[in-house]
Image: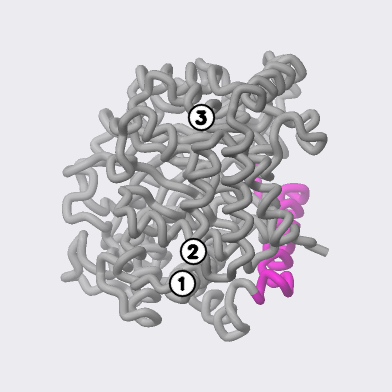
């Protein structure tokens, strides 16, 4: 499986990189993930990071936003603004991007079950800034399958959820948006306990399912596949991670060619990387600075297209402005002081790295083919195949730590007993009350008749098996329907997923 020595960077199957010159032509995007509290607070963090040299935005949404509940819903109690920014309406998103021209930044949104609604709101904010669809750039995570496997922020059953995913593919493709309609995520499965091989195998099994769904919706592979993106983790086993990224490019290119006769561009794997959140320790948190630097180095040596570096204090609380800046500086040091970006595929040709690349590709392919023979990703999810494998791997990893077969510095070895430093936390109850007041004000001033008509149109579309959905969702949010109201319409038609 070792690549032909004549294979060049920028040529299928892309083992050595997807561009001929890689970072010598263009550096990776430094896309720090941020979101907490209100839109204004997150906007301030965005502006700080942009001023510090960040080159792309990445939005974290709070749990109610991810689950399709407005901030004043009983299910949102105690969660508003905690895990990310609270977004109830287009007006919240306008505040989030206040003073940030959407035709000058690329925005990634980590959102899945409500991805269509957030994309529609982003489009509406762009319209109100005078930015046309074709000038909006970014990535929508929109990977619902991994939610059933590892993360849990799903709403609807798999079939209507996949219909929404495919409709986003259709809408972005037909509108010729410079927007990646999906970021197929191995990251969250890795964080739940998957191995490096499982991260690739399970991610690509999901990816093949999405491609098939888009084709079933009438889209040609060449029209949407070049804009598919991926999201992987970077952990601390330096050479394994580098080989994993090289194997990922090669395997996806080959799978797309074998199963869909895709062109090189349609099988070209572009990916974002985030350093390993689960590797961060609350004990001796400054050790995390070193962990993150090693993981970021692995991502860059492996050829990532964009990168988020975690802040060292994230195991304790929301990152402070100081720690978030240091995380960004880690990337900038790699970019400007190490010389690593001057070389395309620096470890290509290494006996060790090439051997690891071959092994990871072969083992990940075996997992993909097992899932394919068993009926594909959805059936594997329904039978718990992914979930059981990841749970077993997580157990084995934790047992290795407890038995000291795997050393975690400061946790099971080299323990000093130093106290965990206290970190300030926002007043979440005050924040939630502020968000509720804004929501009440929105409902008072909007045209309720327009909202009602838009939601009725959406409901009718949801009841028709093949009707487009994005246009109706866009009209609803333009009318100032809230995220919860749009989600409730779809819940009323499709029901909710019961994971039992």
- Whichever of callouts 1 and 2 sits on the residue coming sooner in the sequence is 2
Is 114 inside the magenta-drawn segment? Answer: no
Q: Which residue is mark 3?
A: 93
Coordinates of residue 78 in the picture (x, y in percent):
79, 28
Coordinates of residue 420 in the picture (x, y in percent):
72, 20
Mark seen at residue 166: 2
Contact, mark 1 vs mark 3 (Cβ under 8 Å): no
Quadrant position of residue 255: bottom left
Q: Which residue is mark 1?
A: 217
Image quarter where the N terminus lies is bottom left
Q: Which residues are magenta?
A: 379-408
Question: What residue appears at the point 48 percent right and 43 percent down from the top-left corner?
Answer: 120
Callout 1: few (<14), some (14-19), or many (20+) C-alpha neighbours within 10 Å? some
Coordinates of residue 491 in the picture (x, y in percent):
71, 54
Contact, mark 2 vs mark 3 (Cβ under 8 Å): no
Question: What residue appears at the point 35 percent right and 28 percent down from the top-left corner?
Answer: 129
- Where is 182 relative to 280, above or below? below
Callout 3: few (<14), some (14-19), or many (20+) C-alpha neighbours within 10 Å? many
The residues bearing labels 1 and 3 have C-alpha atoms spaced at a distance of 30 Å
Q: Nearer the viewer, residue 287 or 446?
A: 446
Q: Is residue 484 left or right of residue 129?
A: right
The answer, for residue 414, to whether it is visible in the render is: yes
């Amino acid at each position: 499986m070792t690549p032909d020595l004549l294979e060049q960077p920028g040529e299928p199957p892309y083992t050595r990189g997807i561009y001929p010159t890689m970072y010598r032509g263009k550096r990776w995007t430094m896309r720090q993930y941020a979101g907490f509290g209100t839109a204004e607070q997150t906007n301030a963090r965005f502006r700080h990071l942009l001023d510090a040299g960040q080159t792309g935005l990445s939005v974290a949404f709070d749990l109610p936003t991810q689950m399709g509940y407005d901030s004043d819903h009983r299910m949102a109690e105690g969660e508003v603004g905690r895990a990310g920014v609270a977004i109830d309406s287009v007006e919240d998103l306008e505040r989030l991007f206040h003073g940030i021209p959407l035709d000058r930044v690329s925005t990634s949104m980590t959102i899945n079950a409500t991805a269509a609604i957030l994309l529609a709101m982003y489009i509406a904010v762009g319209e109100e800034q005078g930015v046309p669809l074709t000038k909006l750039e970014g990535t929508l995570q929109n990977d619902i399958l991994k939610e059933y496997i590892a993360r849990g922020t799903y709403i609807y059953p798999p079939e209507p959820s996949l219909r929404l995913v495919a409709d986003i593919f259709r809408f972005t493709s037909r509108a010729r948006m410079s927007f990646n309609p999906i970021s197929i995520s191995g990251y969250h499965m890795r964080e739940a306990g998957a191995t490096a091989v499982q991260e690739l195998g399970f991610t690509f099994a999901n990816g093949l399912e999405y491609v098939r769904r888009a084709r079933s919706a009438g889209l040609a592979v060449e029209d949407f596949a070049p804009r598919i993106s991926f999201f992987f983790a970077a952990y601390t086993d330096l050479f394994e991670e580098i080989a994993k990224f090289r194997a990922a490019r090669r395997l996806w290119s080959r799978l797309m060619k074998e199963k869909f006769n895709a062109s090189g561009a349609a099988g070209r794997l572009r990916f974002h990387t985030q350093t390993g959140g689960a590797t961060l320790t609350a004990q001796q948190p400054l050790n995390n600075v070193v962990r993150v630097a090693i993981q970021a180095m692995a991502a860059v040596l492996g050829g990532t297209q964009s990168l988020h570096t975690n802040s060292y204090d994230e195991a304790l609380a929301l990152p402070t402005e100081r720690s978030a800046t240091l995380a960004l500086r880690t990337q900038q040091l790699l970019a400007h002081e190490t010389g690593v970006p001057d070389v395309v595929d620096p470890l290509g040709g290494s006996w060790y790295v090439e051997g690891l690349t071959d092994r990871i590709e072969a083992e990940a392919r075996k997992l993909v083919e097992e899932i394919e023979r068993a009926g594909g990703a959805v059936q594997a999810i329904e039978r718990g195949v992914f979930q059981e494998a990841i749970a077993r791997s997580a157990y084995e990893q934790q047992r290795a730590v407890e038995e000291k077969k795997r050393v975690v510095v400061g946790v099971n070895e080299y323990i000093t007993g130093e106290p965990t430093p206290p970190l300030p936390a926002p007043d979440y109850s005050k924040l939630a009350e502020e968000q509720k007041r804004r929501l009440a004000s929105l409902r008072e001033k909007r045209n309720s008749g327009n909202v009602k008509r838009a939601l009725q149109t959406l409901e009718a579309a949801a009841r028709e098996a093949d009707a487009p959905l994005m246009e109706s969702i866009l009209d609803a949010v333009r009318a100032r329907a809230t995220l919860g109201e749009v989600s409730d319409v779809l819940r009323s038609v499709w029901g909710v997923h019961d994971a039992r």
